[in-house]
């Protein structure tokens, strides 16, 4: 390849970006392996509230659910990285949900302290809201996504759906051969 100013400049930019890329990968790996993860965006009062709702979306009945998969850490990482624009939706949605909780259960202190039945009654009041749709999406993504993103601890979600994390996938033996033999190539 001929060395031009454009190629030289592109190579320099790529080389300059490598330390940042490697640092981000190292930070994600360290956070995923940490036995006591910390929150980057969510505060200690809000995290259990969101986790309680996520645990109702993917409950732990009959097997591990959102809580065991660490979905709350995926949501936290999402809100501090690629889903920064969704912070306001979470902020207003949680404020509305806390207001509904106070109306329905005036003696309660938090969403997390409500019984399962009370939490489901509370969720039914917001199930058509944009906040709940976003939270449901983040919960499913955190449950089934790559563990390096903060959720799916111990590959719980993948095990539930029998997903094998292979680097390469092979078609079933003879799959293409059958089409060629039948003249369908």
Image: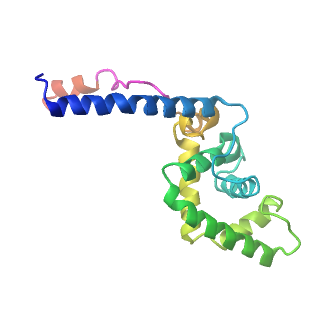
Where in the figure is residue 96, as x and y percent of width and height? Answer: 67, 73
Magenta region includes residue 170:
yes
The secondary structure that most of the magenta stretch takes on is loop
Residue at the image point whose x is 61% and y is 49% from the top? 76
Q: Nearer the viewer, residue 25 or 108?
A: 25
Q: Where, quadrant-wise, is the N terminus in this rendering?
A: top left
Span shown in magenta: 164-174
Where in the figure is residue 6, as x and y percent of width and height? Answer: 17, 34
Drawn side of residue 149 relative to residue 17, left or right: right
Q: Quadrant of residue 103?
A: bottom right
Q: Quadrant of residue 69?
A: top right
Q: Is residue 185 visible?
A: no
Q: Where, quadrant-wise, is the C terminus in this rendering?
A: top left
Q: Nearer the viewer, residue 139 or 181?
A: 139
Drawn side of residue 55 relative to residue 170, left or right: right
Residue at the image point whose x is 67% and y is 53% from the top? 42
Relative height, residue 54 to residue 167 (above, below) = below
Where in the figure is residue 37, as x and y percent of width and height? Answer: 69, 38
Magenta region includes residue 10:
no
Residue at the image point whose x is 69% and y is 50% from the top? 59
Q: Is residue 121 visible?
A: yes
């Amino acid at each position: 390849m001929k060395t031009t100013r454009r190629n030289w400049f592109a190579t320099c930019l790529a080389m300059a970006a490598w330390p940042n890329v490697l640092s981000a990968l190292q930070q994600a790996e360290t956070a995923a392996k940490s036995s006591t993860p910390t929150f980057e965006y969510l505060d200690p009062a809000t995290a259990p509230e969101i986790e309680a709702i996520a645990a109702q979306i993917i409950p732990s009945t009959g097997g591990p659910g959102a809580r065991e998969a660490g979905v709350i850490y995926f949501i936290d990482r999402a809100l501090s990285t690629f889903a920064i624009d969704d912070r306001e939706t979470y902020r207003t949605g949680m404020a509305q949900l806390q207001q509904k909780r106070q109306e329905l259960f005036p003696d309660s202190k938090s969403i997390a302290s409500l019984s399962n039945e009370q939490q489901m009654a509370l969720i039914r009041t917001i199930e058509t809201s944009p906040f709940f749709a976003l939270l449901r999406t983040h919960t499913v993504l955190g449950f089934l996504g790559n563990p390096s993103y903060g959720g799916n601890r111990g590959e719980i979600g993948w095990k539930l759906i029998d997903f094998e994390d292979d680097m390469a996938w092979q078609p079933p033996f003879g799959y293409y051969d059958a089409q060629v033999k039948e003249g369908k190539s």
